Image (cartoon, grey):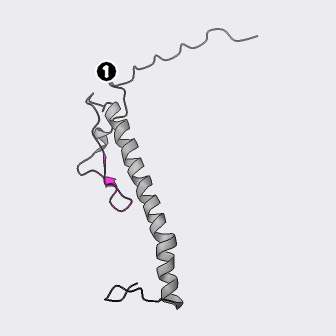
Amino acid sequence: MTWADGTPAPVGGRLGGYIGADRVVMRPAIAEFDAVAAKIAEAVNTAQQTGATSSGTPGAPVLRGDSALTLRVAEGVTAADIAAGAPGPSSRPTPRRRAEPCSSRPR
């Protein structure tokens, strides 16, 4: 804290403890949370761009924001916008045939 003329104001007691905790603990923790949030958004949106939606279109970014406070799902995103498939002619998995029942029993 500083006085109006810019000289440091000594702060002690409970208020000094709160200010010290803010500077030493809270601000660095918030910066770390913000960095993690930005990395999550980047990783999810990058994965989205490499995949395809159920209709075969490339995925678009689904997360917005660059801090823990602002990170959110982008406006208007629905389940159909999630790019969970591989890009290509068909992003739907090939259906598997059912296995034929075994006609002989093991002895």
> Given the current orientation, which residue lies at the most extreme left position?
76
Residue ID at (28%, 45%) = 78
Which image quadrant is residue 59 in? Answer: top left
Q: Amino acid at mark 1?
A: Gly
Q: Residue at x 29, y 42 (%)?
A: 61
Residues shaded magenta: 59-74
Q: Is residue 12 above or below residue 95?
A: below
Q: Residue at x 51, y 72 (%)?
A: 24
Q: Position of residue 49 (x, y in %)?
A: 31, 34
Q: Is 82 covered by the magenta stretch?
A: no
The residue lying toward the viewer, choosing from 78 and 31, is 31
Residue 60 lies in the magenta stretch:
yes
Asked whether, in this view, residue 16 is left or right of residue 89, the answer is: right
Comparing 98 with 6, the one in front is 6
For this orientation, the residue located farthest to the top is: 104
Of 72 and 39, nearer the camera is 39
Q: Does residue 22 lie above or below 16 as drawn? A: above
The front one of 46 and 91 is 46
**Dot 1: element:** loop
The quadrant in which the C terminus is found is top right
Mark 1, residues whose alpha carbon is within 10 Å: few (<14), some, or many (≥20)?
A: few
Number of on-image labels: 1
Q: Residue at x 47, y 75 (%)?
A: 22
Q: Please tell me whether residue 74 is drawn above or below residue 88 in the rendered image.
A: below
In the rendered structure, the answer to whether residue 90 lies left or right of residue 14 reads left
Query: What's the magenta bit mostly, secondary-structure-wise?
Result: loop
The residue pinned by badge 1 equals 88
Please state the horizontal and vertical placement of residue 16, each as a whole percent of the image.
Answer: 50, 86
Residue 73 vs residue 28: left or right?
A: left
* Residue 102 position by quadrant: top right
Q: Quadrant of residue 53?
A: top left
Q: Position of residue 43 (x, y in %)?
A: 40, 42
